[in-house]
Amino acid sequence: MAPKTNKNIQLASNILLIVLTILCVVGLLKASYALAAGLAWGWFFSGSHQLPLGSWASLLLKVAIVLLGFTLPFGELVTNAGDSFWLTVMVIASAIILGLLLGKLFKLDKHQTWLISSGTAICGGSAIAAVGSSIKANHQQMVVSLAIVFLLNAVALFVYPAVGHWLELSQQQFGIWAALGIHDTSSVVGAAAEYGKEALEIATTAKLARALWIIPVALVASFAVSSGKFKLTIPLFIVFFLLASSIGSFINLEAFAEYIQPAAKNLFALSLLWMGTSLNKQAIKTIPVKAMMLGVILWIVLSIATLALVLYW
């Protein structure tokens, strides 16, 4: 009976995942709820499929960002990125310095400290992957860092819009705050999309400008932790995003904007759903208490500090 029961559970879980995927595609499941559904599915049904949904989710996210680029004029991108440039530099530098100091206080491994600090300061999983490659972090250190960042991303997706509405932040204020305070691009876009169209445009631009700092931070980390060898990782999807924005600036795509933007939002929701399924009980149980404390403290400080900057800058 046990094998048959397991097969029935596997079938039911896969059907549920298909239904959730369809709801995302047609726009009936918002980004935050999609992530929550994915996390719940991953917790209860991890191992029910052999598909590389995490990798597909990453690809979907990049496609959605490039699609959104067609609706954002290049001139506006440059202006928005320029407006938040020094703020971004200050936030990234402060977050990494604070993370390294807290890592020493908690007596954490240097590799783990750099991964969590860079993931919080720049752009979550992408920064962790780039910095991890440069400092030759092991698999366990990568898994722990990704799990911490992903859990905090999930919290941010619900907390940031709620706080934004409570404080009556403007679209511009929320867009900048989300771009500076939330780790992953997926959660930044998801939170901003729920807040409003203008917030989404500002958050996407500022976040991608922040993501470009992966390269210099990975370079610094490689010399600080390892032998000084550096592996260059260029986020190509940002290049395609800029190209799409340039094309959209020269070709009038207003007639298609009403289709492109909803399609991009639906892809964001789907990517979050699939990302959620990849985080299971085993990954969460591997998180050391001190590493989790570093991630939580660093993220809370960053969120409060960036909110204060947005309100009073």
Image (cartoon, helix red, strand yellow):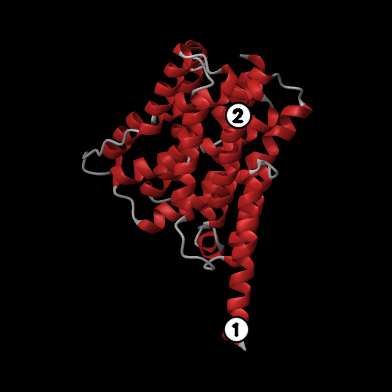
Q: Which of 5 and 285 lies nearest the eye of the viewer?
A: 5
Query: Which percent across, then down, holds residue 152?
Result: 59, 45
Query: Relative to 160, is 137 on the left or the right?
Result: left
Q: Is residue 215 above or below residue 124?
A: above
Question: In the image, which is nearer the foreground, mark 2 or mark 1?
Answer: 2
Q: Is residue 73 above or below residue 163?
A: above
Secondary structure at numbered mark 1 = helix
Query: Relative to 290, is 38 on the left or the right?
Result: right
Query: Relative to 260, is 146 on the left or the right?
Result: left
Q: Which of 264 and 222 lies nearest the eye of the viewer?
A: 264
How far is disc 2 from disc 1 in space, using C-alphas?
A: 45 Å
**Residue that appears at 60% across and 29% down:** 259
**Residue that appears at 35% across and 32% down:** 236
Q: Would residue 183 be seen by someone viewing this image from the given angle?
A: no
The residue wearing badge 2 is: 259
- In the picture, the quarter occupied by the C terminus is top right
The tag earlier along the polypeptide, 2 or 1, is 1
| Number of numbered discs overlaid on the protein picture | 2
- Residue 4 numbered tag: 1
